[in-house]
Amino acid sequence: MLATAFTTAGDLGNGRSVLDAAAPAARDPLDDRLARAAPRTIEAREHIFCEGDRATHVYRVEVGHLCIYRMMSDGRRQVVDFAYPGDIIGLGALGEHGESAQAMERTVVRGMPLATLRELAQTDHRLGMKLYEALSRELMAARELLFTVSQRTATERVAAFLLALSRRAVRRGESATEIVLPMTRMDIADFLGLTIETVSRTLTRLRTDHVIDLEQCILVTICNPAALAELAQSSGQVGRRG
Amino acid sequence: MLATAFTTAGDLGNGRSVLDAAAPAARDPLDDRLARAAPRTIEAREHIFCEGDRATHVYRVEVGHLCIYRMMSDGRRQVVDFAYPGDIIGLGALGEHGESAQAMERTVVRGMPLATLRELAQTDHRLGMKLYEALSRELMAARELLFTVSQRTATERVAAFLLALSRRAVRRGESATEIVLPMTRMDIADFLGLTIETVSRTLTRLRTDHVIDLEQCILVTICNPAALAELAQSSGQVGRRG
DNA sequence: AACCGTCGTTACACTTTCTCACAATTCGTA
DNA sequence: TACGAATTGTGAGAAAGTGTAACGACGGTT
């Protein structure tokens, strides 16, 4: 499912998608191989791999959700991405992993040894290109997130985040307006470069403004997608060059 | 020079370097090819390519400096990287460029058509791997910058930025303490997610604290590298989890 | 069922950074 | 060399987001 491995981060943007075109539904050697791989179950809060671990496999998420993050020595954390079913993780690692991958709930993945992947890529140039493209897409996603975190206000970030999850849900054939947040407020905060309080406050304000509805902290209903999109773009102006 | 194409962004971190090991000085087919390519001169403020342009070449900087950035519809800008001599740019682009590349002064690059690159990569797997690695390194760099912008204070960001430039200068055989800033304050601000005023103020404070010395806005002398490194790590604490 | 720990929400004081205004400096050009 | 334009530096007030703390809701355990 490389073609569908768009990341949350990549979707934070303004809808522009450099690489959207030409996503062939053709059989994928990586897909085939992964389908035959043995599934592996990770319990909630456990890690598939950690920062600094030797990179041995790439994984595809089958069931559940993962949080991909990096830690700083003083405890500050940057969530780099959330992995959903169909997403491939561990692609960028050379030698050792630069991030940790933690299951947010009980999660099932299928893994494929890097050595095998390398062999396959050498014989099948199409696969090689696909890997390159997937990595390139991750780079785009990282820069999109960088943009969001660096230039946007708290409201814009949260709104963009919800819209990203919405688009992603649609891509999986789920509802665009009923969004499940499998991650904690802390995860969201560390993803968007905010504090949990600000995330909470912002979500509350979106609710009182009737842009979204919140149930049990986990289920978000987008009541006013247009307003949400508006907020994601330019909040109440902001930015010296607004 | 793929092996030396570490980016400013990638150096912002705490010195950890996932990929430092095994940088073979061996002949590189990409290098060979680029060395034979015709040089192209770009005047100050002109672009090699712009966001949305069809990606046709990868380029290696020979002389001068480039600013790689993305624009948002409302004018906000995110500088993604600064390219120095030896750096390769345009690697991640698939189809069309996701960023613009602007010369900060008169700059010379050598370009290589993507088609040629693709051909070479198909026959030479070593090159294919190198390209993949270079892209992976760019991803790491992007995430490092994300971390910096997302989690660090203004002082930490500026300090980390100066240290990154210093390391980079060393790598090119230049002085570690005498740093030239070929970019404007605006470029730095848009790189670090700050305003020019904050960048200016922060630099001034570093100077009054005798951590650095400033001459002509462009030449920075690091007087106290240890203090600068200290500031880059954890400023005066800050961060709820400090 | 009561307890405990975790997570999320809310309020308020506080800090950092931003915005705006203007002075000083630098650079390019005449 | 002098001028004008652009860039950079500085200060004061405003705004956004943070830190702290208290409280409530939820889920698992005994």
Image (cartoon, coloured by chain):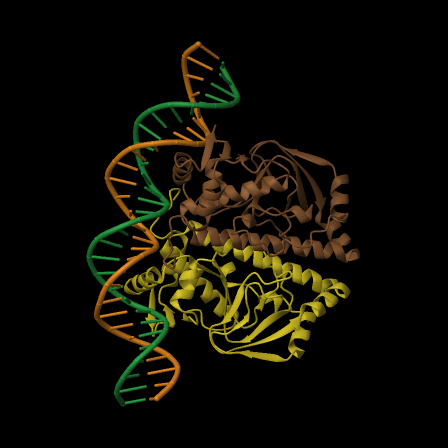
Chain colours: A brown, B yellow, C orange, D green
Q: Is residue B35 above or below residue B241?
A: below
Residue B143, image x, y percentages = 52, 53
Query: Which is more toward the observer, A240 or B214?
Result: A240
Classify the position of the C terminus of chain B by image quarter.
top left
**In the shown orientation, is residue C10 left or right of residue B143?**
left
Q: Within the image, what quadrant is residue A66 found in?
A: top right
Going 45% across and 41% down the picture, which residue do you hit?
A189
Q: Is residue B189 above or below residue A6?
A: below
Residue C28, image x, y percentages = 39, 82
Q: Within the image, what quadrant is residue A194 found in?
A: top left
**In the shown orientation, is residue B135 left or right of residue B223?**
right
Going 55% across and 41% down the picture, which residue do you hit?
A165
Question: Is residue B238 at least partly visible in the picture?
Answer: no
Q: Within the image, what quadrant is residue A63 found in?
A: top right
Query: Which is more toward the observer, B181 or A52?
Result: B181
Question: Is residue A171 at least partly visible in the picture?
Answer: yes
Q: Is residue A227 above or below residue B62?
A: above
Tell how many labels: 0
Residue A114, image x, y percentages = 70, 49
Query: Which is more toward the observer, B185 or A113?
Result: B185
Residue B50, image x, y percentages = 55, 67
Outermost residue on the right side: it is A123
**In the shown orientation, is residue C25 left or right of residue A42?**
left
Classify the position of the N terminus of chain B by image quarter.
bottom right
Going 41% across and 64% down the picture, which residue do you hit?
B188
